[in-house]
């Protein structure tokens, strides 16, 4: 380790994280003074150009915010506008929505586990290099992702930015016969998902415990995916229409993405929060997988988030099979949504955490839009976690400390265009 009074560590292009930004760390007198996620990706102004659009348009427009989790944006948008118009969707249409969402969870989690995060734990720079030594492992991950994509293609019309979603439901519903081949593929995927949990549980995990408050949606009778009421690890809950009273966004000088705080404090959404608040609602096969992996009812080590994502993949595959098994073709593919003046709120659990939408509508047009993505909610907590992690590992040399910081950032699977790709890591030791 160098003994210069100030040092800079640079990552010219951090792979396996989407977006553009930097991490600057300042060390004074042997202690981290601050860690800043300097997100400098240009703002994309989705909330601004939703204004004046017909209420039928946000599901398709907001899907373009993210090519990895477009269904999350579609479902949250639909729920918010339907809420403003006094419409409720249930029965087989709601079941199809949940099935579509399961497809996105499977695809996104498999992508993160196998291609983005596992190489960190196994000492490989990327999944391509990993595949050279462990082809069968990467092929298993790709098969899992393919199963999720297949659900989105059959139900949503295509895997990226699905085109079959509309307000009130779908333009067309698949027949039971069209879903049957999915069930065959998913039965194989369930074995692959269970094996994924066993595999990642064997990784070595740095010691880090989060003390932040968790926030996730909760439903009384099932693991929350496409609906629910906000709930915290402090056992506080509130109606969805009070979300903005508790989760407040603010602009910080070092980031083009907003930072959100929960009642004034950093907090976390995402797999750790969902699992820790809802683990008892997992299906039996998912609970068994979690127990076999050594997870208790709560998980607060962000490095073990890869295990939680694997458990959630088991759940999503199992839930998709259940939904397909009980599916009946609905008489109508959608519920009519008649525009009326009002304010609507919608939230679902994107793979990366709670995604909230709020729309004001009048004369059939959107007059105001607010979208709070998971990564924006997590940023303040990520910075605080990095301070703790770096303080505990300042003895590492530049290369090792840089690698640990990169891995820690990938724990949260940030989607930076939804809120940053970390281009430079700078540590200033004074």
Image (cartoon, grey):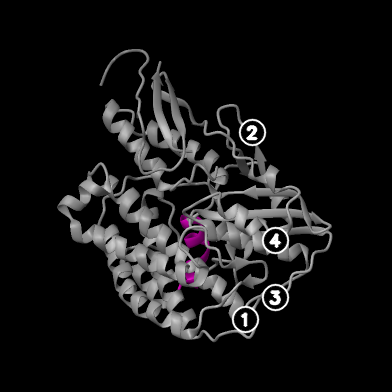
Task: Mark 1 vs mark 4: give the one in front.
Answer: 4
Task: Mark 3 vs mark 4: give the one in front.
Answer: 4
Residue that carries the numbered disc 3 in the rendered image: 335
Q: Give the magenta-colored segment's residue range.
A: 271-282
Residue that carries the numbered disc 1 in the rendered image: 91
* Circle 2 Cα neighbour tier, 10 Å, few/some/many (<14 / 14–19 / ≥20): few
Q: Residue at x 44, y 47 (%)?
A: 412
Where disc 4 sits, the SS reads loop
Q: Are marks 4 and 2 in contact (CB under 8 Å)?
A: no
Badge count: 4
| Magenta stretch encompasses residue 135 | no
Residue that carries the numbered disc 2 in the rendered image: 251
* Quarter of the picture holding the C terminus: top left
Q: Give the Cα distance between marks 1 and 2.
A: 41 Å
Looking at marks 1 and 4 on the same chain, the residue that comes earlier in the sequence is marked by 4
* Circle 1 Cα neighbour tier, 10 Å, few/some/many (<14 / 14–19 / ≥20): few
Q: Give the Cα distance between marks 1 and 3.
A: 11 Å
Task: Mark 3 vs mark 2: give the one in front.
Answer: 3
Choose top left, top right, bottom left or bottom right for residue 343: bottom right
Residue that carries the numbered disc 4 in the rendered image: 56
Q: Give the Cα distance between marks 1 and 4.
A: 22 Å
Q: Give the Cα distance between marks 3 and 2.
A: 39 Å
Where disc 2 sits, the SS reads loop
Where disc 3 sits, the SS reads loop
Choose top left, top right, bottom left or bottom right for residue 178: bottom left
Looking at marks 1 and 2 on the same chain, the residue that comes earlier in the sequence is marked by 1
Looking at marks 1 and 3 on the same chain, the residue that comes earlier in the sequence is marked by 1
Choose top left, top right, bottom left or bottom right for residue 361: bottom right
């Amino acid at each position: 380790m160098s003994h210069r009074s100030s040092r800079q560590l640079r990552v010219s292009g951090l792979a396996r994280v989407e977006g553009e930004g930097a991490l600057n760390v300042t060390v004074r007198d042997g202690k981290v003074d601050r860690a800043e996620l300097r997100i400098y990706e240009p703002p994309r102004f989705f909330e601004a150009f939703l204004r004046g659009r017909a209420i039928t348009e946000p599901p398709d427009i907001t899907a373009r915010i993210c090519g990895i989790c477009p269904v999350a944006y579609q479902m949250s948008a639909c729920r918010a506008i339907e809420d403003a118009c006094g419409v409720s969707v249930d029965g087989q249409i709601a079941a199809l929505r949940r099935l579509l969402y399961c497809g996105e969870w499977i695809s996104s989690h498999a992508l993160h586990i196998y291609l983005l995060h596992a190489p960190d734990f196994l000492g490989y720079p990327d999944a391509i290099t990993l595949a050279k030594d462990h082809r069968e492992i990467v092929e298993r991950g790709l098969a899992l992702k393919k199963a999720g994509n297949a659900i989105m293609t059959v139900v949503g019309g295509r895997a990226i930015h699905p085109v079959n979603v509309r307000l009130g439901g779908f333009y067309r519903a698949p027949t039971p016969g069209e879903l049957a081949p999915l069930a065959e593929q998913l039965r194989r995927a369930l074995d692959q998902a269970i094996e994924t949990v066993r595999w990642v549980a064997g990784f070595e995990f740095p010691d880090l415990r989060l003390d932040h408050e968790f926030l996730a949606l909760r439903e009384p009778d099932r693991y929350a995916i496409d609906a629910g009421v906000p709930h915290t690890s402090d056992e506080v809950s509130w109606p969805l229409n009070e979300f903005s009273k508790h989760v407040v966004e603010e602009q910080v000088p070092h980031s083009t993405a907003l930072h959100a705080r929960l009642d004034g404090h950093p907090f976390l959404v995402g797999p750790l929060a969902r699992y820790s608040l809802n683990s008892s609602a997992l299906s039996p096969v998912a609970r068994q997988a979690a127990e076999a992996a050594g997870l208790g009812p709560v998980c607060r080590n962000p490095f073990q988030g890869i295990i939680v994502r694997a458990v959630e993949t088991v759940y999503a595959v199992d839930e998709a099979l259940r939904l397909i098994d009980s599916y009946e073709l609905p008489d109508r593919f959608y519920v009519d949504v008649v525009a009326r003046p009002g304010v609507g709120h919608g939230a679902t659990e994107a793979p990366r955490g709670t995604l909230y939408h709020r729309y004001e509508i009048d004369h059939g047009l959107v007059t105001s839009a607010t979208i709070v993505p998971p990564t924006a909610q997590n940023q303040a907590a990520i910075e605080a976690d990095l301070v703790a992690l770096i303080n505990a590992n300042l003895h590492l040399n530049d290369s090792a400390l840089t690698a640990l910081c990169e891995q820690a950032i990938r724990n949260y699977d940030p989607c930076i265009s939804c809120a940053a790709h970390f281009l430079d890591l700078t540590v200033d030791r004074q």
